[in-house]
């Protein structure tokens, strides 16, 4: 019962935060809504008894990432709130709305049509709570470490390379050597 | 206080850490490329401007060095397939052929970039590091049989490509190319992750074989369908299948041309490898869902790609749309994998190998020609036979190959597709074969139009001075031309390597 209430409250916070990110005109408010959403997810992690991930969620996502967002927004200047009322393609907002509702409908229909016997809905995806068994009784961090450094060690190392190379590329892209904008058809020797 | 902490620590009984057994030989290609890439980065950091000229050469050597372990693995054939991490990473003949293909593609891309990067005002050392990282992602992708490593490999391929698409920083179109590609790619990744999370929920495992087992007894057909559709859409963006191709033309046109070649060949091939791994290993029992989906995607992709390519006046944009159409051809065998799974991987890999050679060759010609004309408009190729007969002959060969006209290699690749599609007399396969045949004719029109420009029409500005081809581009042209012609005249050589490939199950 407590589980259900906590779940519903945090689900509302997550979805409310997500909607707030999209609909807030002020980018700072949008970033703050994102924090609300991240915190809701952290609560869900605690509900699943994965305390370490909940901690990471708060420290890394709620803390570092959003603070970085806020830095960028502040540096770019938020005094001028850009209006996004014009539609480059006529009717794109309406089309996007209809598309999203249809997608939601398809996903919900998929969920609720699935499952043998009475196990319809999300149960079809994960099985009944009573049938679930915890993987091991090890503490979270040990489980996580075992998974990362044995079975998924290769993907883990590849992710390390990915982050390094993304940093290298991002530094190059933001470095500014100055100079005019280029207007050439096909670059070859003509680009200087 | 300390007593409390000690009691907490006492509760944690640490098991000894069991180091996973790693077959170092099997991952040697990846490790060699990783080490070489790291070495290049360090040399760049220490030497700065003094070593800038060396970077393309070093990168080329890195690709060739990584090719050595691929060959040694291939030579110890009786030890294949090698399986690591509980079967999440498999090295078999299929993945070795693909690794060879990706490394050689990387080598040619490095050759194509050499003059382009050093003569323009670019940060070129980092460009080569990003290319190497992306190729490394492709090596990982060829062997991945697990959702996590497939996703990480996909991002390792894509993120450097997003960055490189925007490499011509002061050109607005390049900025647009990078941004568009990144936004679309991230969107596709999100959809893919949704599909993957559904698959994980259904199977309780990220390993593809476990997913196959769970899906075959699963009674949740609507959910399975949803998961399959989402995963296929995610890969559909990567291979620029219609209707997920909208990023391709703008990105191809705005990105630096060597990178365009990279996107059109290597990145696209990697998308197909991911698609093959997932469809063939994880969905073997789900052909009733996947086959119609693939048939529709392939048919629409080739038709729309060809029809739009007909109207292009810019050669790079035309190659972009023709690449969309070619993606439709390559995807076609997956529409009959349910009954013909033994032949699907070899047909697709054969096509990928020959497609890589002929398309890289065509891009090499575009880059060489642009050094003189400074343009990729099709009209600027007028009368090229008059002042650059060798280049014209090479381009004609590549275009014949793309159109599927013997003796160039493309005909054999297409022939293999037809064989797989018509094998077993399946309604879906025959229909798709007919669509493919009609499309080949449409495609021949615009490929041959360029040949006509080069051979028969007058030079637009009357400038008939010779084209100087630098050595790196000469090597690239010679390599691609060699593969294109040899695979057409002696198709047996290609089928010796890429024939009868199977995805080994761990």
Image (cartoon, coloured by chain):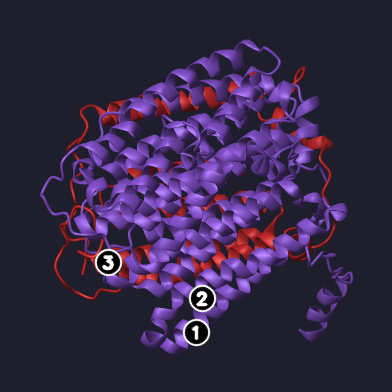
Chain colours: A red, B purple
Quarter of the rendering occupied by the N terminus of chain A: top right
Return the residue at label 1. B43
Q: State which chain disc 2 sits on.
A: B
* Distance of label 1 from label 2 (alpha carbons): 10 Å
* Distance of label 3 from label 2 (alpha carbons): 42 Å
Residue nearest the observer in this picture, A52 or B336: B336
Q: Quadrant of residue B317?
A: top left
Q: Residues within 10 Å of mark 1 (few under 14, many from 20)?
A: some
Residue B413, image x, y percentages: 57, 34
Left or right of residue A28, residue B67 in this image: right
> Label 2's element?
helix
Q: Are marks 1 and 2 in contact (CB under 8 Å)?
A: yes
**Marks 1, 3: nearer the viewer:** 1
**Marks 1, 2: nearer the viewer:** 2
**Which badge, 1 or 2, is on the more N-terminal residue?**
1
Tell me the residue at 25%/74% (across/down).
A176
Residue B329, image x, y percentages: 51, 30
Q: Residue B58: which numbered mark, if any? A: 2
Residue A80, image x, y percentages: 16, 57
Q: Quadrant of residue A3?
A: top right
Return the residue at label 3. A74
Quarter of the rendering occupied by the C terminus of chain A: bottom left
Left or right of residue B276, residue A30 in this image: left
Tell me the residue at 31%/50% (across/down).
B389
In the rendered image of this protein, does residue A178 appear above or below residue B473? below
The reply to whether label 1 and label 2 mark residues of one chain is yes
Tell me the residue at 77%/60% (across/down).
B73
Q: State which chain disc 3 sits on.
A: A
């Amino acid at each position: 019962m407590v589980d259900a209430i906590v779940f519903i409250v945090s689900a509302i916070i997550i979805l409310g935060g997500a909607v707030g990110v999209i609909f807030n005109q002020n980018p700072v408010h949008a970033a703050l809504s994102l924090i609300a959403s991240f915190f809701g997810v952290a609560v869900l992690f605690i509900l699943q008894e994965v305390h370490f991930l909940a901690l990471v969620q708060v420290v890394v996502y709620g803390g570092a990432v959003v603070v970085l967002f806020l830095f960028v927004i502040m540096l770019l200047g938020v005094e001028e709130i850009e209006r996004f009322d014009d539609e480059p393609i006529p009717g794109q907002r309406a089309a996007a709305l209809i598309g999203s509702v249809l997608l939601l409908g398809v996903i919900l229909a998929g969920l609720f049509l699935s499952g043998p016997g009475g196990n319809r809905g999300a149960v079809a995806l994960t099985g009944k709570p009573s049938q679930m068994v915890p993987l091991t009784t090890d503490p979270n961090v040990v489980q996580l470490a075992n998974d990362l450094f044995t079975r998924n060690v290769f993907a883990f190392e590849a992710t390390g390379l990915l982050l390094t190379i993304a940093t290298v590329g991002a530094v190059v892209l933001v470095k500014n050597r100055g100079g005019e904008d280029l207007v050439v058809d096909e670059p070859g020797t003509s680009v200087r | 206080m300390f007593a409390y902490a000690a009691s907490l620590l006492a509760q944690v009984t640490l098991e000894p850490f069991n180091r996973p057994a790693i077959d170092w030989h099997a991952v040697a290609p990846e490790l060699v490329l990783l080490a070489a890439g790291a070495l290049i980065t360090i040399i760049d950091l220490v030497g700065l401007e003094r070593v800038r000229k060396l970077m393309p050469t070093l990168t080329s050597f890195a690709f060739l060095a990584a090719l050595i372990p691929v060959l040694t693995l291939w030579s110890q054939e009786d030890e294949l397939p090698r399986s690591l991490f509980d079967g999440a990473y498999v090295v078999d003949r299929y993945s070795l052929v693909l690794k060879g293909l990706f490394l050689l593609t990387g080598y040619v891309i490095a050759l194509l970039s050499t003059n382009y990067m050093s003569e323009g005002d670019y940060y070129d050392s980092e460009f080569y590091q990003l290319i190497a990282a992306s190729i490394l992602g492709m090596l990982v992708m060829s062997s991945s049989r697990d959702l996590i490593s497939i996703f990480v490999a996909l991002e390792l391929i894509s993120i450097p490509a997003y960055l490189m698409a925007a490499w011509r920083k002061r050109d607005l179109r390049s900025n647009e190319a990078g941004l568009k590609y990144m936004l679309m790619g991230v969107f596709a990744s999100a959809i893919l992750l949704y599909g993957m999370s559904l698959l994980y929920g259904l199977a309780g495992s990220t390993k593809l074989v476990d997913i196959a087992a769970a899906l075959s007894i699963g009674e949740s057909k609507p959910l399975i369908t949803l998961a399959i559709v989402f995963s296929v859409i995610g890969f559909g963006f990567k291979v620029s299948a219609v209707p997920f191709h909208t990023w391709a033309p703008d990105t191809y046109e705005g990105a630096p041309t060597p990178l365009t070649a990279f996107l059109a060949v290597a990145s696209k091939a990697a998308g197909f490898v991911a698609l093959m791994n997932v469809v063939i290993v994880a969905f073997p029992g789900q052909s009733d869902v996947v086959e119609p989906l693939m048939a529709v995607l392939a048919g629409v992709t080739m038709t729309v790609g060809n029809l739009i390519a007909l109207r292009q006046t810019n050669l790079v944009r035309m190659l972009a749309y023709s690449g969309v159409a070619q993606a439709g051809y390559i995807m076609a065998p997956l529409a009959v994998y349910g009954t013909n799974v033994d032949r699907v991987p070899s047909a697709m890999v054969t096509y990928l190998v020959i497609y890589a050679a002929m398309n890289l060759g065509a891009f090499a010609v575009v880059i060489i020609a642009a050094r003189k004309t400074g343009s990729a408009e099709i009209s600027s190729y007028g009368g090229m036979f008059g002042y650059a007969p060798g280049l014209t002959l090479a381009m004609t060969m590549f275009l014949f190959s793309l159109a599927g006209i013997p003796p160039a290699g493309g005909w054999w690749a297409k022939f293999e597709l037809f064989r797989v599609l018509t094998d077993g007399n399946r309604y879906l396969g025959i229909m798709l074969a007919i669509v493919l045949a009609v499309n080949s004719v449409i495609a021949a029109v615009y490929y041959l139009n360029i040949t006509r420009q080069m051979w028969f029409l007058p030079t637009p500005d009357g400038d008939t001075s010779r084209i100087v081809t630098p050595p790196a581009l000469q090597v690239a042209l010679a390599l691609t031309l060699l593969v294109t012609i040899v695979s057409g005249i002696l198709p047996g050589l290609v089928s010796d390597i890429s024939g009868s490939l199977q995805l080994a199950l761990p």
